[in-house]
Image: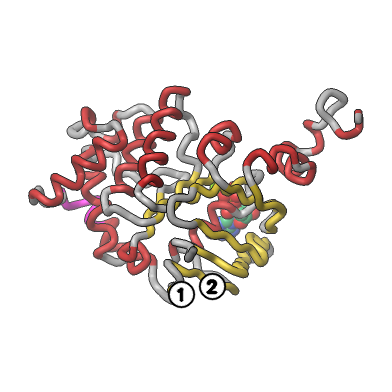
Amino acid sequence: MTAVIEAKGISKRFGGVQALQDVAIQAEAGQVVGLIGPNGAGKSTLVGCLTGLIRIDAGAVFFRGQEITHLSPHQRARLGIGRTFQKLRLADRLTVFENVAAGMFAHLFRNEGASRLRRTVAPVRRPEVTDAVTRALRSTGTESLRDEMVGVLPYGQRHFVELARALVSEPDVLLLDEPATGLTDSEKDRLCEVVTQFRAGGRAVILIEHDLELVGRLCDQVMVVDHGQPIFAGTPAEAQRNPTVVVAYLGTARLGPKGGENHA
Ligand SMILES: Nc1ncnc2c1ncn2[C@@H]1O[C@H](COP(=O)(O)OP(=O)(O)O)[C@@H](O)[C@H]1O
Ligand SMILES: [Mg+2]
């Protein structure tokens, strides 16, 4: 089956830091692929390479088999690549409705155009916009917040607004960068429902997440990176049993006499 999104041989250096070295990842229709690894491993950088926000040094990115490496972020968004940011990119002084509506227009403009729109223009209330926003709010459970200013919302709720903003343009692939940070258990359940519903439509998800329980619940496959290098690919259960992954992820310090290999 052709992957909805695929990247091969991705390398990216920032000054003295090799953030990614020859990394590959792919997600097929209906799949949720986890991208895990310690802080600084290169996970957010890889998402940036897929969306085009980060220019790669080597490698290639494909959408439904077509190479898109040369396309700009807004061209990729228009093709159907949606994302959320680890550091949420919401406008605090606009309402939930306006923030989510801005997600429909972001892909029509170059980056600065979209952010200017987000800052200064209340999006037009055309029926097709209102309908799409309503669907996105409903699917993320944020309908009742529609007229609230984003700046007053608790952290967890803001994550769902960010998610709605990514969903409003009805992407084919969703790249989620640590969407569960700061969520309560019931909010995590809601996040699982949103992702499950999205993938059920034959769409693909790449999920960066530290909560391995959540990764186990949602992901068909996981990819583990450490220091910019791919160190494992397989099922979540295999990842949790893999000594290399355990050491990279938890750090050797956590492998004491109780759980450690030293004790074996
Ligand atoms: N824009 C940037 N400029 C310089 N260094 C960066 C930049 N973005 C990321 N890095 C570095 O690249 C490495 C990978 O970062 P990142 O992709 O954010 O890791 P992760 O998301 O896995 O925590 C880190 O060492 C980070 O400091
Ligand atoms: Mg990150």
128 to 216, vertically: above or below: below
Find disc 1 in the rendering and name its residue. Answer: 67
Name the residue nearer the viewer: 88 or 3: 3
Q: Residues within 10 Å of mark 1 (few under 14, many from 20)?
A: some
Locate the C terminus by quadrant.
Answer: top right
Q: Are marks 1 and 2 in contact (CB under 8 Å)?
A: yes
Give the residues drawn in magenta, as a range: 116-122
Q: Is mark 2 within 8 Å of ligand 1?
A: no
Rendered image quadrant of residue 117: bottom left
Rendered residue at 41%/48% (across/down): 84
Circle on res. 193: none
Q: CA distance from mark 1 to mark 2?
A: 7 Å
Residue 58 belongs to the span the image colors magenta: no
Find disc 2 in the rendering and name its residue. Answer: 60
Left or right of residue 186: residue 249: right
Please, what secondary structure does the residue beneath circle 2 have? strand
Name the residue nearer the viewer: 218 or 125: 218
Left or right of residue 147: residue 14: right
Chief SS of the magenta region: helix
Which circle's residue, 1 or 2, is located before the other in the chain? Answer: 2
